[in-house]
Amino acid sequence: MRMLLLIRLTLVTAGVLLANSSASPNTKVHLQINSKTGKHIGIQDREQVIAGMEASLLSLLGFSKRPKPQGPVYVPESLRKLYVRQNSIGVADIAKPGIHTRSANTVRSFFHVESELDEKFRLPNRFRLSFDLRRIPLGEKLQAAELSLSRIAITEEDDSNGPRHGRVLVYDIVRPGIKGRSMPILRLVDSKVIDLRKNATVNLDVHPAVERWMKNHKSNYGLLVHVMTGSKKLEKQHVRLKRSIDEQNETWVINRPMLFTYMDDGRYKMTSGKQILDRRARRAALRKNRRKDGRENCRRHPLYVDFADVGWNDWIVAPPGYDAFYCHGDCPFPLADHLNSTNHAIVQNLVYSTKPSMVPKACCVPTALSSISMLYLDEENKVVLKNYQDMAVLGCGCR
């Protein structure tokens, strides 16, 4: 299992005796070489061990190389909220209200690429948005796509006699027009009625457009957004489509249009309802199993993976680390029901009790694993939300 690989790497590099049953239950194990091990390992050898560990963990997380962030990055608030939501439910599939993300486990964010063409759109409520999707990994499949637009509420002072509601329309530019020769070919992909007196973010489904672009990136001419306010007098920008002339970058990065693609990297299976219920039941049923002879029966132990210890806190936005846990303990004969054993393990322990030379004793291993969510920066300094399956131990048993 991937989780076992992660734990094994941690054990080797950390030099910590995880089998020590006398350790405090609150002990946290970090991804670093401790001082005791350091006495026996030279500086160059230690650096090689850390480099090997980093390469193995990067491969485990699906990276070919370590991302190198370039300057400060703003994390969209919607991604932060989704990250918190995903960690609370502990499944690998993206679950966002209002959009069907199917089997997606990765959310990639893109902002509008500014160009000279922007100056041709002088009206505040009509603008072309351009997004560069060429660096999306080829192995990922699009499951959904969403355009997120921030707004500024229109007060009665701005337009006292104007209508209260408007409409946002978003078109896929199938073919751009040529001035004096041909009109552009547009395809309406979504529209929404909006309350002009409110400033809540409006999200539009642009899956058909993005799906077409990913089949042929040369056909990506962007999206045309048209905001209909129903008032010719209203010249103020209600939906934030373009940067104001005197607007500071710190303000614009918060309000600029964002495109979110919900991708499936093909590495994991969708979580069933039964698996979710089983995980919740195991969380509620975790218990300690200390025997009278001082030895502990098979159970879950603390193991904290700290990303700062390998210098990853500059590109992993959240979390700073996570509780991976590990399984350790004895599988005594006869196996009790609470040790979550299989019939095969019971038979194996029975044979072991009569003839130890024939088979080994049943082992304490993870029987249930949960997912974690990570916010990180990719090679282009774009924010990505990704769910990783089977990263934390929920339950242990004798197998």
Image (tube, helix red, strand yellow):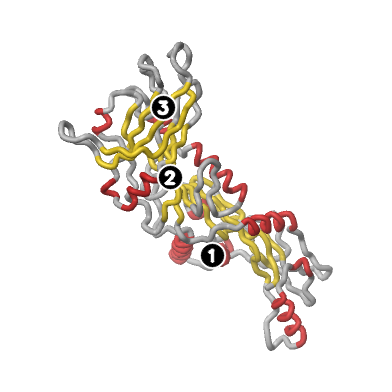
Q: CA distance from mark 3 to mark 2?
A: 19 Å
User: Label for residue 145?
Assistant: 2
Q: Secondary structure at mark 3?
A: loop
The residue positioned 36% from the left and 44% from the top of the image is: 209
Disc nearer the start of the sequence (2/1): 1
Instruction: Tell me the residue that label 1 is attached to.
Output: 2
From this viewpoint, is residue 72 visible? no
- Asked which quadrant contains residue 294, the reply is bottom right
Q: Is residue 217 left or right of residue 169?
A: left
Q: Position of residue 222 (x, y in %)?
A: 31, 40
Q: Nearer the viewer, mark 1 or mark 3?
A: 3
Q: Nearer the viewer, residue 306 or 74?
A: 74
From this viewpoint, is residue 332 visible? yes
Q: Is residue 188 left or right of residue 292?
A: left
Q: Is residue 190 above or below residue 23?
A: above
Which image quarter holds the C terminus? bottom right
Q: Is residue 180 above or below residue 306?
A: above
Q: Secondary structure at mark 2?
A: strand
Q: CA distance from mark 2 to mark 1?
A: 29 Å
Q: Nearer the viewer, residue 211 or 138?
A: 211
Q: CA distance from mark 1 to mark 3?
A: 45 Å
Q: Secondary structure at mark 1?
A: helix
Amino acid type, mark 3: Val
The residue positioned 73% from the left and 72% from the top of the image is: 330
User: Label for residue 239?
Assistant: 3
Label 1 crowd (10 A; few <14 / some 14-19 / many >=20): few
The residue positioned 30% from the left and 38% from the top of the image is: 186
